[in-house]
Amino acid sequence: MSTRRSAPTALKGLRARDPYLERERERYEHPLPSREFILELMTEAGAPVEAGELAERLDIAEHERDHFERRLMAMAREGQILINRKGALCLAGKLELLPGTVQGHPEGYGFFLPDEGGADLFLSNQEMSKVMHGDRVMARQVGVDRRGRPEGAIVEVLEHRTDKVVGRFMREHGVAFVAPSDRRLAHDILVPADAVGGAEPGQIVEVRIVKQPARYVQPIGNVVNVLGDATDPGMEIEIAVRKHQIPHEFPEAVQARATKIPSKVLKKDLKGRTDLRELALVTIDGETARDFDDAVYCERQGRGYKLYVAIADVSHYVQPGDALDLEAGERGNSVYFPRRVVPMLPEALSNGICSLNPDVDRLCMCCEMDISASGDIARYAFYPAVMHSHGRLTYTEVWDALSDASSEAAERLAPLLPQLEALEKLFRVLVKARERRGAIDFETIETQMEFGDDGKIRAIHRVERNDAHRIIEECMLAANVCASDFLQGHRHPALYRVHEGPTEEKLERLREFLGEFGLQLGGGDAPRAKDYAKLLATVKDRPDAELLQTVMLRSLQQAVYSPEPLGHFGLAYESYTHFTSPIRRYPDLVVHRAIRSVLAGGSGLALDLVALGRHCSMTERRADEATRDVTAWLKCYYMRDRVGETFDGTVSGVSAFGVFVALDSVYVEGMVHVSELGNDYYHFDATRHQMLGERTGQRFRLGDRLRVTLVRVDLERSRLDFVPERGR
């Protein structure tokens, strides 16, 4: 039975003047005055306004009062208005106050990051004493500090965003406290004697904040979970998921919904789907993969190729607004740690009914493409389908089979070899098209950790990518481009993957750096990916090629999700989106829903795509930071017995407090503090990526070779300290 929205109530007086009234009517059955109109009336008043007076002016009825007050409180939380000590509403802008977020620093000071962008404000240790990293506050600039940085003062805390902290339980002089693992949280958390939860000194615990910090008052918390000893196997992951506030336990409602999802494809699910079960689609992934998003099939078609990319149809099982969807949206993506995955969806879906497992029927969304001999996509089509994976293949065995026709892998995969050979030929065609397009191809080193039965790290190996990895990569790129073109062509709202070129400031610094090497980046004030690719090709055989590539890579902006199709600079695509991994990335699930909407004749998604894009970009960064933390700790643990050993390495980073060195043979990174560089005053040059000795002229620059000795392993800070080999 359908529901019909009742006819809008006629509004009189001031409320009828609201320029956003129609928008509010579309969103709410009983619309309130818009935020914009409330701010307009407060501006006209020219002075602080009592909430009751504002409600009377706007003819807020008695039954609307609670909703109106909630709207005002939301505006206060977001920093649009401020409620002064007398309870009156003030315009934040009139008070020269800015809403924003606090970013802590391990040394105790911090920064205020304004919501509207612009210069960050330095927050002294004294200002940071009343807040914690991540809090939302109102602040104003009060001057500049002795280093010339704009300095801020916190006027009001809008929202405390830290309610749980993970850290080491300590007891000193009879006082119990928790030292946070996240060193951006400068406060120790005091724990009352009756709230230690059985924790012993030195153990890692989770503490719930019951009293937030204020000036001269430390935060107080209760121990709610004793995780164990710091060196227990997997403890580094337990710490990371809590430190970065990654949801890692599925609520009961989500688990209950997952149990209702069938474990196999039902007959009724096949209605309206193309049957691809006879097509020899296969998955090609790493040896340890357990969730299979994508399957491929390729065959020759005249001088060109027909490529099928079948993607798990998660959107069939995860409906908008249900418990599974809300939790997946909150998580944003799966997080892949060494030896453990924190999945976006419960295992029953991620490794079960949604995963394109071999020898079972699975629902999918297929992108079928006709690709010319020159690598151009001449035609494509999207449609829901049912498939039956004919093989769970690995990159290693596929490349072995393609490289050596007499190999065991070739013999084992003989029935699939014709389509694998067609895939390889298509890959060669697509690579040439990529080169013509001018996409940037940065070379990066990937590593993999080897663990023993005791859960401890044994070795770190370099991962060698073979062309089977690149075959799948090019197939996925082709499908993603088609998805973007499809949604743009139908003018349907969606989330796009956006990677913009360098900012004006970064471009200027890059050109200045390259100029010292007699090099030039083409493209003038608006270089394209092709200009980067051309320069990379020019320098690839130089001994300093790694240095030049690193600096060029760092000049680019970070990729984000956005409803605006602003293109992907690195891949040289005018429009690009993520379609191929809906099991592990929420933006891909959103794109699937958008494609289904177009196929069904729809025209929109009931989502705030701007906010969703920001959120998914944040969860992606959150996952990256958490995995870096875990990797850094594991590498420190691996090196703990090698203090005193000497290694060869390369300067991988330069900062005002020292240089970072990546070791050649063990693939770990540590720091040489500025005080260890030599008997001189060293000055940091951000443009030239170097430290320069004032008296000696001794220089330590990004990419320099350095022989160092490991002198200290700090597991608490996940830090390795090196000193240069004497005589450097």
Image (spheres, helix red, strand yellow):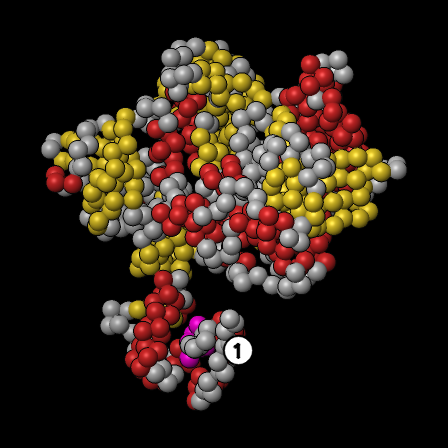
Q: Is residue 724 visible?
A: no
Is residue 37 magenta-colored? yes
SS for callout 1: helix
Q: What residue is rendered at 61% in x and 39% in y?
A: 361
Vertical relation: 439 (above or below) 319: above
Rendered location of residue 713, percent (x, y)? 37, 20
- What's drawn in magenta, residue-wise? 35-41
The residue pinned by badge 1 equals 22
Say which amino acid is labelled 1. Glu
User: Residue placed farthest to the right in the image?
Assistant: 302
Q: Is residue 76 visible?
A: yes
Q: What residue is rendered at 38% in x and 35% in y?
A: 240
Image position of 711 (left or right of 507): left
Prevailing SS of the magenta stretch: helix
Viewer-closest of 654 and 169:
169
Vertical relation: 195 (above or below) 268: above
| Total labels drawn | 1
Q: What residue is rendered at 31% in x and 81% in y?
A: 62
Rendered location of residue 379, percent (x, y)? 80, 48
Vertical relation: 688 (above or below) 80: above
